Image (cartoon, rainbow, N blue to C red):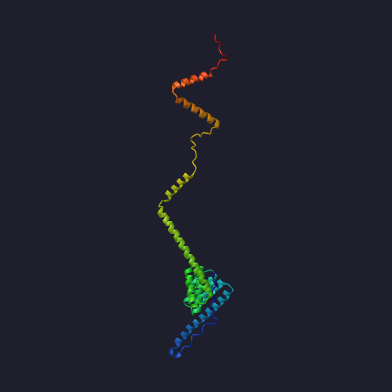
Amino acid sequence: MIGKLMRIHSFSGAHGGLGRINSKERPVKGLILLFIVFSGISLSAQSSHKKLRKGDELYDLEHYKEAEQQYREAADLKYGDPVAQYNLGNALYQQGHWETAATRFEQAARSAPDATFKADALHNLGNAQLKQHKFKEAVEAYENSLRLRPGDAETKQNLQMAKKKLKEEQQRQQQEQQNKNQQQQDQQQSPQNPQEQQQQEQQQKQQNQPQQPDQGQPQQEPQPANQQQKLKKEEARRLLETAIGPEDQKNARKYREQRQQPKPSGKEKDW
């Protein structure tokens, strides 16, 4: 879980005066002109401060959209004000506009009035980068913040989280690259086009299927065991007859006829 944003920055009062101008060194006309210019700047700074105060009140009420508008107007009235940029970044962050929030935090860090303010801006910049899964940039922002404020516990915790996410991302990218290289090697080893590969798959599929009997030829039905035995005997007799010669066949036929004649019932008398 990402740590909370650093607090918003606000001033308790308006900026100090611009100092007195020596009337002896400048003509009267120039003094009037400079007075008008500096008065305009002072009024602009006061108006910017009022916008910042109003934005802070809305921010504390979690009315981030309304607070954003006040901070934008304050930044327009006082161009480059790091406080307005920083607080505007916080309001954008709370609405989920992390990319534009990161831009505001970068601007605030560049024009920060002191090290503490810059450390806060860099911490929040790291949070915005982490939300965008820009882990390398988040690590850099947190490390820069810790250089200015080494003892900040939340920044250290977020830095460790960003480093862990960065390592996981690098491992995932490395695994994806290895898979891609393996696929390329497989394609080089088997340079078959998709059509040939499909034909081979179909042939292999047909070979694996059980063979079906030819429907054009009549199927022989299985015969009973006694009929098969009778057929075997007849086939054996035909084979035996074809194996012996004609004379043997004649003698065998004569022998069978004699055996079939009835025998005399009694002995003939010897007259």
> Horizontal and vertical percent for residue 47?
53, 79
Residue displayed at 46% across by 61% down: 175
Quick one: which residue is furthest to the bottom in this view?
24
> Horizontal and vertical percent for residue 189?
40, 54
Q: In this view, does 168 lie to the left or right of 63?
A: left
Residue 79 visible in the current orientation: no
> Horizontal and vertical percent for residue 150?
50, 77
Residue displayed at 48% across by 83% down: 38
**91 or 67: which is nearer to us?**
91
**236 or 134: which is nearer to us?**
236
Residue 64 visible in the current orientation: yes
Quick one: which residue is furthest to the front in this view?
270
Q: In which quarter of the image is the N terminus?
A: bottom right
Q: How many labels does the image show?
A: 0
**51 or 184: which is nearer to us?**
184
Quick one: which residue is furthest to the right in this view?
61
**33 or 240: which is nearer to us?**
240
